[in-house]
Amino acid sequence: MKNESSPACRVLYVNIMRNLESLNFKGLFVAAFFSCLFALSCSKGGGEKTVPSLSVDPTVLSLAPGASGTLNVTSNVAWTVTPPTGYTVSPSSGSNNGTVTVTASDSPTNGFLRVEGGGKSVSVALSALSPELSLSDNSASISYEDGKTATFQISCNASWTVSMPSPKPDWLKSVTPLSGTGNSSVTITTGPYNQKTKSQVFLTVKSGSKTAYFTVTKEPAPNIPPTKPSGLQPTGTGVETITTFSWTASTDANGDNIKYTVMISKDNSSWTTVGTTENTSLKNSTPLDINTKYYFKVVADDGYEGGKTESDVASFTTTDTKSSWADGEVKQYDVNSDGSMTEVALGSSERPVKLIFTGDGYTQDLFSYGGQFDKEIAAGVKALFEYEPYKTYYNYFTIFVVAAYSNEAGISVGSDYEHRTTKVDTKFKCTWEGDGSTGIDCDADMVIEYASKCPGMKGSTENETCTNLTLSPISIIINADLYAGTNFWLSDNWGGFKLISIAQTPAREPVYSSYDGFAYTLRHEYGGHGFGLLDDEYVYYTTQKYPKDDEESFRYWQNLGAFCNTYLPAWDNTSKNWYSDSEHCNLSLTAKVEGVNWNTFASRDEYKATGIKLFEGCAYYGKGVYRSEQISCMDNNMPHFNTISRWKIYCRIKITAGETPSLEEFISKDYDKVNKYSSSAVTKSYSRRKCMGPVLKDPYHKKPYRLRR
């Protein structure tokens, strides 16, 4: 039988023999031995046996999300492919030589792919690449016509998708392709667009964790601008500094709504906007300079691209004097002995006590000099200074008046401004509670903003501004015809005594009794609460005892300076704070006349006829709290402050002026010792007035307390 060796054995035999040829004689013997051994071991002995082989190229493959790669399998056996999580393969099995495609998912990780067959196994290291994504452009503008297109290029090393906007506008017909792998061109096709404003959408291109955006703008359809305004007025000379600009309306071929902007110039070159309106007239809110030539024009605008048309330029020259208030304008007046006012230059008065008056619900047309706003402010000031002690000490006072334009006239109605049942657009948002209450709410922040326009009120910090306004209480006269009135005391954590008073009084009131009119209410709210820091002396609950919670509130406000002090809380220039003696006020929680501060007057001969003693019932409750006299302004609005109230107001005047109050001076000039109006006590009906109590309110930080009286 013929012996044949396999190819592998022959190769091994040749290699061994070559190595032994270099050896000596003994090596020849060994070579002969190995020759025989190989002849025996490599004999097929009856048939040929196949040795399995398996190899893969490459053994390292890096793929970006969604990308694919190829593996070449070299083998003489059947094999299978097992990919790690995050990858798929095709095919997953085969035999002999073959090619396998490996595809990464949107979020692949590093791992090993295994190819196995014939008892052999080969591992391929798979690594996840970060996707790379960029666009050739970020945006395209496409004409309004039908069939217009735009393209952009995507550069990417992985798979990507393009997301359409939602909702998709009708003019965006198609974006193709919406997905792919690697670099590609994307085409945007649009339809017709008839609107006169631009339309924009965003396409989102995403590859793995990478995102890019492409903005598509469809340009507006052509717009026909309005005709130019004509007939401009005013012209000529002697034009008021607050005047009405007017013109003839433009027309618009598209039927678009037109807005007009009035612009003025002193040199016919540099233009300033007066205002914008949909009407054909506009009044300036800031006074023009007197005796000055102005140029003006009107720009009509339909709101669309290319929709502005300017009028011809007109001109006029202003008069030598102003005729109307500007919004935010401040004037200063000294008070005369009869309660009237004389205007003085801002900051020129040496009078030490500064009061601030403003108004709410007055529209621009009510601010002409000598008009409704002027008359009602003058009436309020006169009402305050008609009676003691303001009447005697009038020459201590100067009045700041601040104009505040409201868009609508009147007052809102509701529990507060945010819950109004009747909404009126006013500067300070004064809102009457209604439903039997006299309570009025307002936007204290805005009030303080306007009050701080007065000379000496605006500080370098909020703290300083609030300190200045503590010394100058604010009166808001409201353009409304109703019986109501409220005074705020605002306190914050500014340190020391910071008690801002804001009194609100409608300018005209229906008269239900002798003491219900505007003048009486203003004296009570502003003269009593606002400047005098007095508490109410009327009673709602005739049989109820003054509550413990109200006692604590009473002491709290006393410590801030309200209701209290034989002398007004004194200002300490060193610590920049107020300090007070909280045992003195126009009311008392002490049941013995010897323990109240008004006993000083009760024991004086000059005041025996006034009936000063201890009367139970005030501050809304009939029991446990006491007043000094039977009836006064703080009870039913009568034009008479009781003795302790007059003394307290006098003390505030003197202390604010930097002077020392004198009991003897006060008594010698106290010309209203005896109440000549009434001796009968008055109990208020609950339906006529409503106690609001302390609530949270802070003009800057919305933190501490507001007490409304």
Image (tube, rainbow, N blue to C red):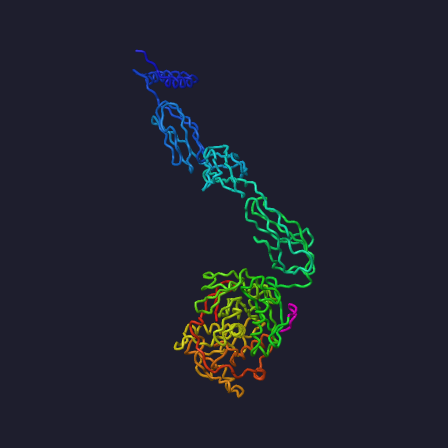
Q: Residue at x 40, y 17 (%)?
A: 14
Q: Position of residue 495 (x, y in %)?
A: 52, 68
Find the residue positioned furthest to the bottom. Answer: 605
Q: For residue 440: magenta?
A: no
The picture quadrant where one finds residue 663 is bottom right
Quadrant showing the N terminus = top left
The answer to whether residue 482 is above or below residue 74 is below
The magenta region covers 343-351
Percent x, y of residue 415: 45, 64
Q: Nearer the viewer, residue 352 or 241?
A: 241
Q: Is residue 301 visible?
A: yes
Residue that extends furthest to the top in the rendered view of this protein = 1
Q: Is residue 579 at least partly visible in the picture?
A: no
Q: Nearer the viewer, residue 94 or 350?
A: 350
Apparent side of residue 57 relative to residue 373 in the rendered image (left or right) = left
Query: Dominant secondary structure of the magenta stretch?
Result: loop
